[in-house]
Amino acid sequence: MSFKIVDKSELNVDLRKSNQLLTEVTVASKDNLGLKLDVTEGTTAVVMIAIRKSSDVAVFEEVSIKNGQLEIAWMDLLQQWHDHSKFYADVFIQIEDQLFKPILDVEEKSRFLSEIAVNEENISKDQPVYLVYGTKGTTMTLAITKGTLYQMAAEKLRTSIQVTKFKMSKTGYRFELEISSDDELNIEPQKFAMIQRTTIENREIDYPVEISKKSAQEIILRGKIDKHGEWVPFNWDLYIEFTSDNWSLRGLLEVKKMLPLVALKVDQDQFKKKIDLPDSHIMYPYMTVAGNLAFTYRPLEAYETPKVLRTERWAVRYAKLMSPIYRRRNIWIGYEKNSFGAHDNGYHFFKYVYENNKHPEMYYVIRENSPENKNLDGMRDKTLKFMSWKYFVYLYSARLLVSSDSKFHVYNMQRRDSALAKALMRKKNVFLQHGVNGMKKVPVFHQSQGWLDFIIAPSQFEKDHITVPLWGYEANDVAVTGYARWDSYEDKTGSIPFKQIFVMPTWRNWMEGMSREKFVTTPFYHEYQNFLNSPELKEMLKESNTRIAFFLHPYFKDYVDLFDIDESVIDKYGYLEVDMGEEIQKSSLMISDYSSVLWDMYYLKKPTIFFQFDREAYLQDEGAYLDYDNDAFGDMTFTADETITAIKKYIHNDFVEDDEIERLRPKYFNYVDKNNAKRIYQAISANEERLTELKEDITTRRIKKRVKAKVAKLPIVGKAAKKVSKPLKKFVRR
C-alpha cells in the first residue's frame, strides 16, 4: 500500500475541523495498523497521519473498507520517519467529504495499545519505538508517538525512578533507588545495565540487582557499580532491565533522577569521588546539565597532576578574593579545540583584535607543547599558558569567552564539577564556530542546552534554516558575518609543483574507545584502505603529477599508523602536523564524507567530492540538516571505484567545478571579502553589555526548570490561573 508525504497546506481538508468516529484498533503490529470503524457505508477511505508541530502529513489514499474494517501497511512510513526525533502524531480518516478523528472506548489505564519496533532483533536503548495509544482527556483519540526504547517503556508503564541513597568508596558505588507508578507496577527487575552513551554500538556491563521491597505501586532496589567489566571512554548511563506482561520488547528503564541530598554527593569535584583503574584511567559519577545521574570512564590527562590541581585550587581562591579588581578589567578569553590550536576562527579573530588594538584585555589560551604555539610569536604579552597560575586566575575572572569551540575546550572537557568549571558555566560564550553547519545534527548546540549565547553565522541561509528555527535561538542572538579564518584565505594551488587532492574523513562517534584490533575490522578502515591502495588511483596520480594529502581527524590519532600508505603518491598527516588551512588553500580538490571542512573548499571555488560509503548508518547515528541528495555542492560517491571515477573527471577538466555547483554559491555565502573579523568584532561590541553579564549558576537553573515543570502540571484553570500566575512567575524568577 503506497502513501505520500505532503505539507498540511496541500490538504483539501482542515485537520482542525473533524468529527468523532468510534474506532477499535483491531491490529497493531510491526507491519500493519488495522482499524474497526463504526460506519455502515463507504467503500474506501483516506487515512492521514499528521505529526504535531510539523507540517508533515502521511496520506494513504483509497484504503478499502470491508465490513467496517480497514488496514494500512505502515512499515515503510515508519522507516521513512526514522530521521524524526521523538514526536506525537494524530490519525485522521476521510470518508467521502467527511473528516473523522478516531475515538477509542477503552479505560484510561489501558490507553497504550501496542509498542512497535522497526527492528526487534538485538534492539538497543536508542532504537526507535512507536506506541499506538489513546490521548488523555474526556474523549480519547487515536495517536502515535515515537521515541527511544527506554523512553517509550517509561511512558507506557508510567514509571518514575529516583536514586534515594548513594555511597562512595575506593572500590565502587553502592546505591538504592525507588521505582514507583500511579498504576499497578507490573514489572520484574532482572539486572542493572551500565550502557555506553552511543547510538550505534551499545556496550553494556551488567550488575546484579537486589530487591529490597516490593508492593503494588513501589519497588525498592539496591545495587553496586564497581571496576569489573570492559570499560571504554567516555560516558555511561545506568538502566534497569526488566520483564513485564505489559511490554513486549526488551525492557529498559533509565536511572537518572536523584534526591537532592544524593545530587549534592554526586555534584562534587571528581577527584574527591573517583575510582582509580588500571592504565591511568579513572571512573566517577557526575551530574549532567539536566541534573541527572551519569558516569564517566576516562584516561587521566597529562596535566591532571597533584601539582597542577593544587595550583588550580589556590589560583581560584586568589581570583575570588581579587574578583572586584579583575571584573573591572573586562577580560576576554580566546581559544580553540582543547586549547591546542591556533589556526581556526578563534585564532584569526584574536589576531585581528590584537593587531588592531580593539580590546587590550583579550587573551589567547594555548598549550605549551602545541605545534601551533609559534603562531602566537609577536603576541606573547596576551598569551596565557594552559594550566598556569595566570591562566587559572584570568580564566576565573574573565567576562567573556570568544572561541571556535564550546567553552570547556578552554579548560578540561571532562570536568564539570570543580569550582572553576562551575564559574565557566556562568560565563557567556561567543561561538565563532569551527565549521559551517548542515552536514550533521549537533543537538548539543541547541539553545535549550545552555552552552552557547551568541552565534557567529557564515550565512543568512544557515541563520534562517538552522540556527534560529532548529537550534532555537532568537534572531538577535545570531550575527551573519562570515568566518574570521576566511579573511586569510586565497588560492595557493600555484605555490606547489603538483596538484594536491585533500582527503579528510569524519570521525564516527560509534568508534569512540575502539581498540586498534577492532578498528581494522570496521567498514571505515576497509573502504579507505581499498581507496588509498587502488592500483588504478596510484597510476592516475603518477601520470597527472597529482598527490593526495590524507588528513585524519584528531580523534583518529591512535589509528593513523594503521593505514598502509604509498608515500610515492600520498602524504599522511596527523592533527596539527601541518597547517590545515594552508593545505586547503594549496589543494585543487577535496574529498570528505560529512566534514564541514568541505565548505572551506567550496568557499575557495574549488571542487568537492562527498564519499559517503556509510550514509545510512551515519545518518542514523548523527542525522543531518541538509538533504545530501539535493543540497550537496559536489559529486556524491558511495564506493571507492565511484570516487576514483570522479577524481578522473576532475583531473581531465583541470579541476574546474561543475556549473550547477557553482550556481549554488550565492545561496550559501553572503560575504566573500576580507572583513569577516571586523564584522564579528562589531557584532560583539554592539551586544557587549549583555554578553559580559554572568549567567545564573547551574543549580539555580536546575531548580527553576523543576519549578516550571511542577507549575505546568498544576490543575489551575480560569480565574484561579490569573490570580496565581503573577506570584508564581515572581517565585520562579527568584
Image (cartoon, rainbow, N blue to C red):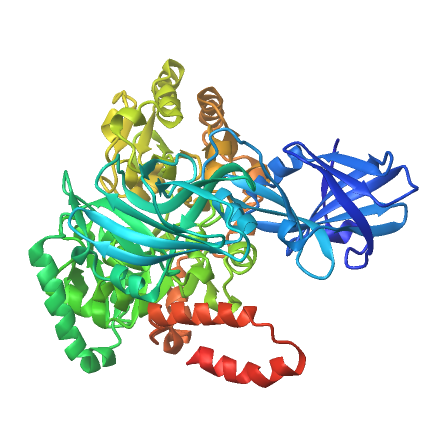
Please tell me which residue is depicted at 66% across the width and 37% down the height of the picture.
77
Residue 112 drawn at (x, y percent): 63, 47
Q: Is residue 127 left or right of residue 397?
A: right
How many marks the image carries: the answer is 0
Q: Is residue 638 above or below residue 443?
A: above
Q: In this view, does 642 lie to the left or right of 14?
A: left
Residue 390: percent from the left, percent from the top? 13, 66
- Residue 159 % position (x, y): 49, 53
* Displayed quadrant of residue 329: bottom left
Q: Residue at x 27, y 56 (%)?
A: 166
Q: Is residue 105 above or below residue 252?
A: below
Query: Can you say whether 339 is above or below 310 in the image?
Result: above
**Does any portion of residue 27 appear in the rendered image?**
yes
Q: Nearer the viewer, residue 57 or 500?
A: 57
- For residue 46, side relative to residue 707 (left or right): right
Query: Within the image, what quadrant is residue 361 found in?
Result: bottom left
**Of residues 18 and 598, which is closer to you in this image?**
18
In this view of the protein, which residue sits in the foreground, 503 or 312? 312
Q: Report the quarter where the N terminus lies.
A: top right
| Outermost residue, right side | 41
Q: Residue 89's spot in the image, x, y percent?
A: 66, 50
Give 673 or 13, whichever is nearer the viewer: 13
Q: In this view, does 376 lie above or below 694?
A: above
Residue 342 appears in the figure: no
Is 417 on the left-hand or right-hand side of 123? left
- Quadrant showing the C terminus: bottom left
